[in-house]
Image: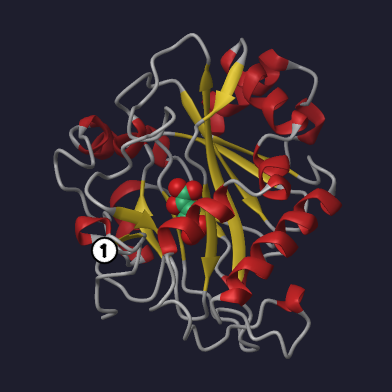
Amino acid sequence: MPANDLLGDPEALREAMAERGHLLFRELIDPETALAARHEVLLKYAILGEIDDRYPLDDAVAGDSEGVRSANVRAFSESVRTGANYLAVTDAPEVIAVHEALLSGPVKSFDMRWPRFVRPGEGCGFHCDGPYMNRGTSRIFSSWIPLGDVVRSDGALMLLENSHRSERLHNGYLQSDADRDGLTWLDDDPSTVLDKYGTKWLTTDFKAGDVLCFGMHMLHGALDNASTTGRCRLSSDSRYQRIDEPADPRWNGSKFEGHGGSRVFYPGLGSWNNDDFQDEWKNVDEHGRIQVAPS
Ligand SMILES: O=C(O)CCC(=O)C(=O)O
């Protein structure tokens, strides 16, 4: 159920977030802003052969990815994350305003942002964001933002209803630190996760301009992109906290640490149950070239 009717009423937004653990806003940002970011990101992926531009670029039809092995993906990843049109989405005034209402004060987006290019056959294992983001304040919200339309079968984000109240998650998992404790995905089977931690899977067909906001205790993930037309899924996750609270050094600062070592955010190209964060973070050599063999 969209929460657009609560916009402009910070207290109602905070109450609804506490109750539901998430808020969906339809067309919170101008769809053209999301589509401009989509185009900017796809143009960059096309340079690596990740997009087959014999089709219209914005259709995002997967290419042969041949350019990835020789590319400096460290530079590539930074270029995608810092693109002006992409930042216009994560830091759109409407998005900032929602987080300011939720956190009752001025906020900043994390310096790290997570634009996602998800090829057919790829998804994201189930997890909560807390253990990955909790070295500064715990008062953080994530926003998942489709860059273009993302229908369910493309692997739209799924949230597990009521999981933010799961005692099982609160007794251990949510107190852990993903890096220090070497976390992998909780599970990649949605029915197992449902039985253990929640009541019902929630998802929808998202349109350009929609924003899904959720807290650090909400269990979520994405089924594999099942596009039958080779269409890649483009979306973004970004995180927001108050400017006057401590920030997690993994994701904030002029040279943030990330997951350490020489890992670069380049999701997909294999599946490792996120062992050593490899589903999303790839080890690179001194030239920024990917070092892990796709499995
Ligand atoms: O979009 C996805 O595949 C996963 C996003 C996610 O897990 C997140 O926002 O934390």
Question: How far across and how far down the image is residue 82, in percent?
Answer: 59, 46
Question: How far across and how far down the image is residue 252, in percent?
Answer: 42, 29
In this rendering, position of residue 192 left or right of residue 98: left
Please state, as top left, top right, bottom left or bottom right, where the N terminus lies in the image. Answer: top right
Q: Of helix, strand and loop, which one carries label 1?
A: loop
Residue 197 sits above or below residue 215 on the image? below
Residue at 24%, 44% in the rendered image: 260
Please state, as top left, top right, bottom left or bottom right, where the C terminus lies in the image. Answer: bottom left
Q: How is the image coloured?
A: secondary structure
Residue at 32%, 47% in the rendered image: 197
In this rendering, position of residue 157 left or right of residue 178: right
**To which residue does mark 1 refer?**
285
Question: How far across and how far down the image is residue 189, in percent?
Answer: 33, 67
Residue 206 sits above or below residue 232 on the image? above
Residue at 44%, 76% in the rendered image: 68
In-front residue for pair 285/185? 285
| Disc 1 residue: CB within 8 Å of ligand 1 | no
Going by the numbered disc 1, the residue's amino acid type is Asp
- Where residue 154 sits, quadrant-wise, is bottom right
Question: How far across and how far down the image is residue 70, in percent?
Answer: 40, 77
In-front residue for pair 3/245? 245
In-front residue for pair 175/159? 175
In-front residue for pair 217/160? 217
Residue 126 appears in the rendering: yes
Residue 200 appears in the rendering: no
Residue 165 sits above or below residue 259 on the image? above
Residue at 67%, 34% in the rendered image: 91
